[in-house]
Image (spheres, rainbow, N blue to C red):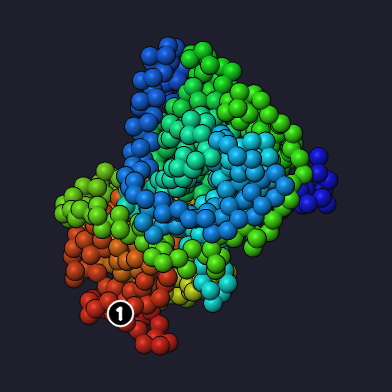
Amino acid sequence: MPGPLSPQGTVQKHAVVLLAVALLGAPSLIAQAKPADPFLNWLDHLAQRQLDQRERAIAEIRTVAEANRRKQFVRQKLVEIVGGLPDYRGPLNARVTGRMVGEFHTIEKVIFESLPGFFVTGNLYRPNREGRYPAVLVPSGHTQEGKPEPQILAANLARNGFVVLTYDPIGQGEREQTYLPELGRPLSGGGGNEHLELGARSILIGQSVARYFIFDAQRAVDYLVSRPDVDADRIGVAGCSGGGAIATYVGVFDPRIKAAAPACFINSFRTLFSGPTADSEMSLPAFLASGLDVPDFFELAAPLPWLLLATTEDYFTPEGAKPVYEEVRRWYRLYGAEDRVRFFVGPGPHGMPKESREETYRWMTRWLKGGQGDVEDRPVKLYTNRELQVTASGHVDGEPGSRKLHQVILDEFRVHRKPRTVDALLAELRSRGVPSPGPAPAVMVTERIAGQNFRIERIRFEGEPGVVCHANLYLPDAPGRKPAVVLLEDKRLPVPLHVTRSPSTAPLAEAMVRAGRVVLELEPRDSPNANDGRPFLGNWVTNERVDLIGRNLAAMRAHDILVGVDVLAARPDVDATSIRGYARGVKGFWLMLAAAVDQRLNKIWLDRTPWSMAAALEGPLTSFLFDAMIPGFALHWDFKDLVSAIGDRRVLWSDPTNWMNQVVYSGPAYRYRHVGEPEIAYLDEFFQ
């Protein structure tokens, strides 16, 4: 076994660390006590109930016929929630750009097109001896370097008589989606961030970004079977972490796969939901709400041979993986194929240690080579990223006609866009629970603060049973009923240098209360502990968790706004016929949703809110798109439809922005401040 300073040990340790940081962000990987998170607990309760329901359905399956009916249901659901797979079957236009010949195997540098202009870069390891060999596809995990990560596994398999293809997943290696030559790095910060940002776009058009990861893998299999040195009837797949997820998907969706070995990915959402939430391609939309859990992947492909791999110190814990294995083993027993599923736990942290690699060689040799072959992990020559580079520049951007995934998604949007009416929009919002059914909930005052000519009450109330919202209530000292404002709170928080700092809304609330308004500075439901601070993404984890259970956080927050209106309207010092709303940035979307369905918000003010949903699909990068992520919304409506539902004269919109928080000129319907002009300059117009 390689020591900690040996080449193999160093590369393996380096890969483990990069996998961990890229997948989840370093802070979330360290075991530490976290503050209480009531909203996450509430969401987890709903998730566990959905998993309970699935568990009861699985327990009722006792025959192969019943299992096959379940498999039909699962396949239909998976196709539905990923938005189907691309139906393109055009030429791969594969090329070999270079070769490196070693003692036992040769590495070919290959590039092919998954979709037209959508290039995939890979390294193909083949034995130096002539012949036709079984093949193994090895998608990389979440290391930013991509295909060099699994080279120890790939080289040993090639030495043992397999053709092996490793390749760069989207956003990694030579396929970084926001790479800027001027910076020498991706603007997004890395592949995991790109997976997430592109995941939000995909959900906006009713798809999952996983469909492109799956399709890349299928096209990689197309490339393998096109080669004369590959036996098309003996193809396997193996991968770790994100590569383990892709290995699982291709095992499910591609019948040409005859054996699979996913590692450090297998856990039930019993533990995953409130734990290490993964990137968008690994967390499918409405997955739990559809009655699914991770075991369904392996059960759907039965009796495909599965080697399920874990490691002792992984955050995808063996304790979370074992129940998956136990359920899958019981399922395989129905098919008389219990020997076709195996669970192995290797030592150490997230990754594929020598023991796990050897178990993978043994598994592939058993199912693809009749059990004949060497299964020992031996020292191999390791190559640098530069040596394994396929393209001249190190990025597919330089290939003629090269396209980015955001352009592919934009094309999908244009093909499938079907505008619907404002009435259909209102029906959609009602179905998502945006309207408040009333009456006003009980309000608890937690603190009282005296001000000059006004006072502040810190309050809390339930947006729905079990979900607490916090707010500051600004109350003028003057008697009688007064107009009121629901103001969505912004806090002046530290932000990365590349993000425009948003000022606190407290001074604006004070200006409003001094003008004689009752102001509810509201913080809709959130799980702030989940925000890992990644650039551009916002609290993606909470949005993703809500989406998994079939709910929508933007709609839930719009609902909370209207519960805030209930609170104001029930007060004896508020004129219930004169309630207005203010929001800044993407929170303006939540306010538009609320005002569209509730006429009690008789005017709203949006400041620095993105001007168009469709515009989010046009550029290479967005900021805080997750907070506006309603599945399929962009296919049917845009912000102008919400304005139509509210009524033009009831919307004041100042300094509209693009999705990178830069003010853009979008026409005379908007207001624009001159340099240094404060928000307060628009108060009079807002109150008119």
Disc 1 residue type (three-letter): Tyr
Q: Quadrant of residue 354?
A: top right
Q: Quadrant of residue 56?
A: top left
> Where is 301 relative to 3, above or below?
above
> Where is 105 relative to 193, above or below?
above
> Where is 678 relative to 628, above or below?
below
Between 130 and 429, the residue placed more toward the observer is 130
Find disc 1 in the rendering and name its residue: 665
Taking the spot 66% from the left edge, 33% from the top edge, the residue there is 361
- Quarter containing the C terminus: bottom left
> Where is 670 relative to 70, above or below?
below
Taking the spot 36% from the left edge, 34% from the top edge, the residue there is 77
Between 312 and 126, the residue placed more toward the observer is 126
- Quarter containing the N terminus: top right
Q: Is residue 68 left or right of residue 11?
A: left
Q: Position of residue 85 (x, y in %)?
A: 35, 43
Visible residue check, residue 683: no
Taking the spot 56% from the left edge, 45% from the top edge, the residue there is 165
Between 569 and 405, the residue placed more toward the observer is 405
Between 171 and 365, the residue placed more toward the observer is 365
Name, please, the residue furthest toward the bottom.
Answer: 675
Q: Position of residue 655 (x, y in %)?
A: 34, 77
Q: Position of residue 192 (x, y in %)?
A: 54, 55
Visible residue check, residue 116: yes
Q: Is residue 114 left or right of residue 384?
A: left
Q: Is residue 483 left or right of residue 489?
A: left
User: How many C-alpha atoms fall within 10 Å of the one at disc 1: few (<14), some, or many (≥20)?
Assistant: some
Taking the spot 42% from the left edge, 35% from the top edge, the residue there is 253
